[in-house]
Image (cartoon, rainbow, N blue to C red):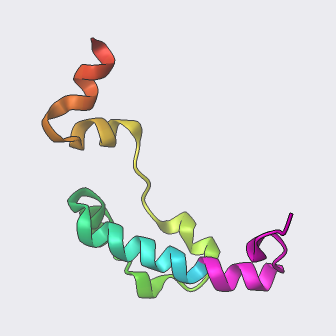
């Protein structure tokens, strides 16, 4: 069985993969999810401000309550309680 390149990558190679992906994730989430976009704007972070993987500590994270409150039509919450 052949391993995927990411499974055998060095630390530097992983950073070279993960850092642009983290920036892209923040760009997409802040552009497409109004709640996340507002939170990122409130703390003044843009994808270009992410220079190393430890910058993830500065990013806002979603909670279960956020997901429940934002889900369209309250469907998720009603499915859990029924």
Q: Tell me: 55 left or right of 68.
A: right
* 49 displayed left or right of 17: left
Placement of the C terminus among the 4 image quadrants: top left
Q: Main secondary structure of the magenta part?
A: helix
In this rendering, the answer to whether 79 lies above or below 32 is: above
Q: Specify whether residue 45 is in view.
A: yes
Number of residue marks: 0
Query: Residue at the spot x=18%, y=31% of the render?
Result: 74
Residue drawn 56% across and 86% down?
Answer: 51
Residue 36 picture location, percent across and down: 30, 60
Quadrant in which residue 28 is drawn:
bottom left
Quarter that holds the N terminus: bottom right
Q: Residue visible at 36% across and 77% down? A: 27
Question: Residue 30, position in %: x, y?
Answer: 30, 69
Residue 14 spot, x, y in % from top left: 72, 78
- Which of 22 and 35 lies nearest the eye of the viewer? 22
* Magenta stretch bounds: 1-18
Q: Is residue 66 magenta?
A: no
- Is 28 left, or right, of 57 in this rendering? left
Where is residue 20? Give x, y as percent.
Answer: 54, 83
Residue sitting nearer the eye, 13 or 37: 13
Query: Which of the two residues, 31 or 56, is positioned nearer the viewer here?
Result: 31
Whether residue 43 is visible, yes or no, is no
In the figure, is residue 66 to the left or right of 58?
left
6 magenta-colored: yes
């Amino acid at each position: 069985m052949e391993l995927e390149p990411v499974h055998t990558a060095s630390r530097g190679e992983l950073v070279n993969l993960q850092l642009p992906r983290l920036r892209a994730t923040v760009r997409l989430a802040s552009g497409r999810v109004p709640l996340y976009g507002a939170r990122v704007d409130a703390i003044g972070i843009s994808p270009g401000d992410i220079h190393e993987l430890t910058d993830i500590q500065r990013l806002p994270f979603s909670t279960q309550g956020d997901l429940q409150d934002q889900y369209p039509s309250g469907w998720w919450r009603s499915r859990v309680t029924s």
